[in-house]
Amino acid sequence: MDMAKMEKNEKIEFIDTKSEREEITGFTFKGLIDGSLLTIRSVIRQIPYILFLVFLAVVYIANRNHAEKVIRQLNTLRTDVKDLRSEQITTASELMNLSRPSNVEKLIEERGLKLSESKVPPYKIVKNKR
């Protein structure tokens, strides 16, 4: 009796593996179009792996898009910094030019402020200690 059960089990296993072989070799274009490919047991077992690969592809695409967005922002900020630096240099040179004594005298005369340069040199005021 044990031999009959073992033979039966072996035959069932053999049939199962044979049907799997037929299913594996049954990958055809027609099977893909009519959807019977998705009902094959070997494909159904791979669905978690396929979904994991799809998830990784989505994460990869999202990461790439985020990186490109950051690079675009970085380039924009570099351009802004370059513009602001040149503006700062221009403003500093204009301020140096305007603060020269000769230019200050010209501005005073142009605006008619009636100010003049002191002819007496500055001196210290010393307080005596008692």
Image: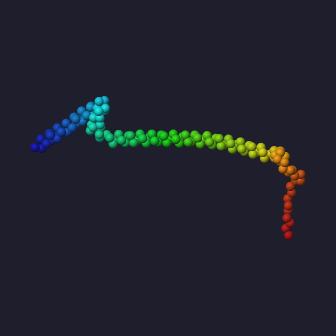
Q: Residue at x 43, y 42 (%)?
A: 59
Position of residue 115 measured from the top left corner of the image (x, y, whole percent): 85, 51
x 33%, y 42%: residue: 48
Of 15 and 97, nearer the camera is 97
Q: Quadrant of residue 50?
A: top left
Residue 58's image quarter?
top left
Q: Residue furthest front?
A: 112
Name the image quarter holding residue 76: top right
Vertically, is 85 above or below 30?
A: below
The answer to which of 12 and 87 lies nearer the viewer is: 87
As drawn, the residue found furthest toward the right would be 119
Quadrant where the N terminus sits is top left
Q: Position of residue 67 (x, y in %)?
A: 50, 41
Q: Is residue 20 left or right of residue 99?
A: left
Q: Residue at x 46, y 41 (%)?
A: 62
Q: Is residue 101 at least partly visible in the picture?
A: no
Task: Tally the marks.
Answer: 0
Q: Is residue 55 left or right of residue 117?
A: left
- Coloured how? rainbow
Farthest residue to the top: give it.
Answer: 29
Left or right for 69, reference 52? right
In the foreground, 71 or 6: 71
On screen, residue 98 versus residue 54, left or right, reads: right
* Place of residue 64 in the rendered image (x, y in percent of width and height, measured from the top left): 48, 40
Q: Residue at x 27, y 37 (%)?
A: 39
Image vertical order of residue 26 relative to residue 70, above or below: above
Q: Quadrant of the C terminus?
A: bottom right
Q: Position of residue 51 (x, y in %)?
A: 36, 41
Q: Is residue 128 above or below residue 65?
A: below
